Image (cartoon, rainbow, N blue to C red):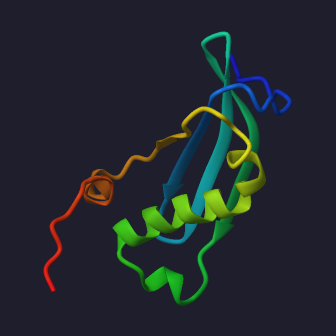
Amino acid sequence: MAPILVHWDPESPIVVETDASDYALAAILSTKVNGNVHPIVFHSRTFSATEVNYDIHDKELLAIFKAFRKWRHYLESTPAPVEVFTDHKNLIYFCESKALSC
């Protein structure tokens, strides 16, 4: 059964799913309604000539960045934390604290 699109509800929890391939990125902004995840909006585009040369973990991070930038008006108004799902394990370093030296 295909997911059903729903209207934006600022009180519902938000889920952002992203993915990047060698030549394109995609993102889905969804909300949780009664325990089910329903999509609100979808975005995809091809990478520019420069972006095609990025490493895969940078492409995955770029997909997250572009999704947050595109849907900023949705994400800033939600009171609940935003869940982000991606399929690239190398992005774990992005979520962990680092001890930086000078």
Q: Quadrant of the C terminus?
A: bottom left
In the image, is residue 32 above or below residue 73? above
**Horizontal side, residue 53 vs residue 10: left or right:** left
Q: Residue at x 55, y 64 (%)?
A: 65
Question: Residue at the top extreme?
Answer: 34
Q: Nearer the viewer, residue 7 or 74?
A: 74
Q: Residue at x 72, y 61 (%)?
A: 70
Task: Indicate the position of residue 61 as horizontal and vertical percent values.
Answer: 45, 64
**Horizontal side, residue 32 vs residue 86: left or right:** right
The part of the image, by quadrant, that contains residue 6 is top right
Q: Nearer the viewer, residue 94 or 41?
A: 94
In the image, is residue 98 above or below residue 11? below
Q: How many marks?
A: 0
Q: Quadrant of the N terminus?
A: top right
Question: Residue at the front extreme?
Answer: 102
Task: Indicate the position of residue 72 as horizontal and vertical percent values.
Answer: 71, 56
Question: Residue at the right extreme?
Answer: 7
**Horizontal side, residue 9 vs residue 15: left or right:** right
Q: Residue at x 39, y 47 (%)?
A: 87
Task: Indicate the position of residue 20 as horizontal and vertical percent values.
Answer: 49, 60
Q: Residue at x 47, y 42 (%)?
A: 85
In the image, is residue 48 above or below residue 61? below
**Horizontal side, residue 23 vs residue 29: left or right:** left
In the image, is residue 24 above or below residue 18? below
